[in-house]
Image (cartoon, grey):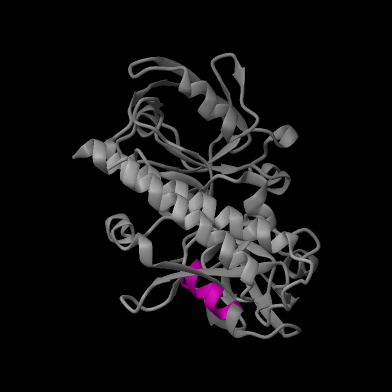
Amino acid sequence: MQFKGQKQHAILMLGGLLLIAAAALIFLNQSASAKTSERAFMGVYLGNLDDDLRESLNYKGSGGAFIDDVVDDGPAEEAGIEEGDIVIKFNGLNVEDESQLRQLIHKAKPGDEVSVTVFREGKELEFTVKLGEGDDEFLLSWYDKGKHPKRPMRVMYKTRCSCADRAWLGVEMQKLTEQLGEYFKVKGGEGVLVSSVIEDSPAEKAGLKAGDVIVKIDDEEIEDGSDLIEYLGDKEEGDEVTVNVVRKGKTKEIKVTLGECPKERCHHCYGKDYGRHFDKFKVLKDLEICIPDIDREELLKDFEDIHIDLDEPLEELREQIEELREELEELKEKVK
């Protein structure tokens, strides 16, 4: 039964990759561009603001939305908002979480000037942002024939998925951008920011904390998350590694005894969750896609009924995705 479940999961993930990548590629290759979206565009990517990250940023508030990245020359960047800021108010309304902030942005109109209050280095700063148009995004949704209401996919591009047969450190990572590097006082801007430490993990037991920046493991320099994952891929459960981190501007050595990855985390995907919309260029750049928060058994059972829609329907897109769907159906039959 477990093997069958793994095969089903593989089919689903492959299906998500092929269908979403195909949709993005076909969209980019159309001679006629889709109409400009009427949704407002602020130009920020939102990350998970968990308790560990709150502590590392010395943020005592109950709500807020963490700015994981800003779009170059986007409305937010031009207004002065930076990576690492926490949005606490939008046009005078308290922001409870990233989902609410997305809704507030989408309810606004392109061209609106809105006040945005952020928490940065212990201070509250207010900016006026002139919202733009979301003309470089498109909406991908899925539904099955009359059985469930039409609903958007939550699309995540992943940097890597953890695996049960690799040694486990137990941290969730975030790309260290230049501005975040300055904020966390890391020279050169290289390393991996620990956004969260998993409870009872080897990392927590050894003393790693959210806000640490991993710059080296043993003798291996760590420039980004892929370096860290690749190095740990050659390790086994029980191996001891020396993790060099920058914490509040000071370098610290921490010895960690690696563990075995818990089964419930075997398919945990690290990366950015773009919610209802995603930037096609960022998706295409990484081309490793997973679809979280979907009942895989239900989706697989009704696989033949799945339809894919775009905001701007295109006949060629539909035909090519239908061919992909048929190929995936054949693959599903082969592995039963």
Q: Can you say whether 75 is above or below 4 in the image?
A: below
Most frequent secondary structure within the magenta stretch: helix
Residue 123 screen position, x and y as percent: 63, 63
Q: Is residue 99 magenta?
A: yes
| Count of all numbered marks drawn on residues in the image | 0
Q: Quadrant of residue 1?
A: top left
Q: Is residue 156 visible?
A: no
User: Is residue 119 covered in magenta?
Assistant: no
The answer to whether one can see residue 220 in this image is yes
The span picked out in magenta is: 96-105
Where's residue 44, x and y in %? Answer: 65, 63
Q: How far from the left and from the top, in percent, is residue 187?
A: 72, 33
Q: Is residue 225 above or below residue 66?
A: above
Q: Is residue 149 left or right of residue 274?
A: left
Position of residue 199 relative to residue 147, above or below, is above
- Residue 294: x and y in percent read 36, 60
Residue at x 55% of width, y 57% of height: 20
Q: Is residue 312 left or right of residue 19?
A: right
Report the front residue among 7 and 279: 7
Front in this rendered view, residue 148 or 38: 148
Q: Residue at x 56, y 80 (%)?
A: 104
- Above or below, 237 against 2 in this view is above
Residue at 30% x, 40% y is: 6
Relative side of 252 to 34, left or right: left
- Residue drawn 78% across and 71% down? 32
Q: What is the residue that sits farthest to the left in this orientation?
A: 1
Residue 164 occupies quadrant: top left
Quarter of the picture containing the C terminus is top left
